[in-house]
Image (spheres, rainbow, N blue to C red):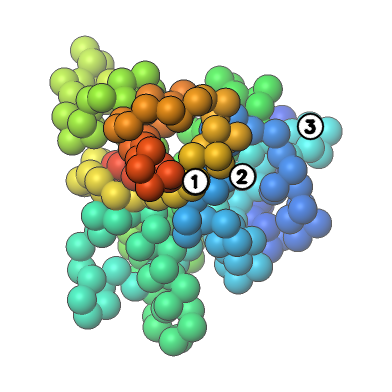
Amino acid sequence: MISLPGMNGDLAITTLAERPELRASLWSMPHTWPAFMEHELVGGDATEWIAAEFPQHVLVATGPEGDLVARALSVPFALGAEGRRELPATGWDRTLRWALTDLRHGRTPDTVSAIDMTVATGAQRRGIAGRMVSALRDNARAGGFKELVAPARPSAKHLEPDTPMAAYAVRARREDGLPHDPWLRVHARAGGAVESVAPASRTVVGSLGQWRRWTGLPFDSEGPVTVPGALVPVLCSLRHEHAVYCEPNVWVRYRL
């Protein structure tokens, strides 16, 4: 079990390696992610793969009744490998591919990247997200890693889909010195620092029919479409009968 400073007895955070019986609950846990994000190009089976191959890098939080209230998935990868060195502009997608490639070729990882951090519907706004981020940091440190990185999805960015992420991420800080965005504030409180923007971190592609089912919107006009929950507009092509969502994230870095 991972111990967090000031953790109350009502929340137990462990690794999936310690609690393998919770694996099925990872995907049935109620959440507030937009439906269209479940169709991310690289995602799909990747989360199942992470749970199977890296259970020691998957954290699970259970409440007093033993129910799953939060999950946090991460992957080890070799950022220092030849041809890498810098955090990729294609963020979440590229990092997952690097982790898969490194595992396949037996390359020694030097960095851990957060991939998913989700608090169950009904358990939000209780400080659990901050505890999970701190637990990811501590778990990476306990594994001998010197860095934890995270392609963060700012939680209030969807309210400003037309604002470029580069401008949003560096918006003037509040009087207390913390970032404007609530999720970036959680990272800052845990010791993370904004490193850069990953402008093409996650991609969702689908036919117009699929997008209509995912969102309930008509998708009947050419060009950008504002979709609830999307951080930037979805680009709709009537001529080619498809729409593309390219999500920017913010790289946050922790020195362990």
* Mark whose residue sits in front, 1 or 3: 1
**Quadrant hosting residue 106:** bottom left
The answer to whether 66 is drawn above or below residue 101 in the figure is above
- Label 2 element class: strand
Relative placement, left or right, of 200 versus 68 is left
Amino acid, disc 2:
Arg
Which percent across, then down, holds residue 72? Answer: 56, 47
Amino acid at the residue labelled 3:
Pro
Q: On residue 64, which mark appears?
A: 3
Helix, strand or loop status at disc 3: loop
Residue 198: percent from left, percent from top = 26, 48
Q: Nearer the viewer, mark 2 or mark 1?
A: 1
Q: Are marks 1 and 3 in contact (CB under 8 Å)?
A: no
Q: Residue at x 69, y 48 (%)?
A: 26
Q: Report the front residue among 232 and 151.
A: 232
* Real-space Cα separation, disc 1 to disc 3, in angstroms: 44 Å
Mark 1, residue position: 207
Dot 2, crowdedness within 10 Å: few (<14), some or many (≥20)? many
- Neighbours of disc 1 within 10 Å: few (<14), some (14-19), many (20+): some
**Which residue lies under the disc numbered 2?**
71
Along the line of sight, which residue is nearer the eye, 208 or 227? 208
Count of marks, rendered view: 3
Q: Which residue does the image show at 29% across and 49% down from the upper left?
A: 200
Amino acid type, label 1: Ser
Q: Earlier in the sequence, mark 1 or mark 3?
A: 3
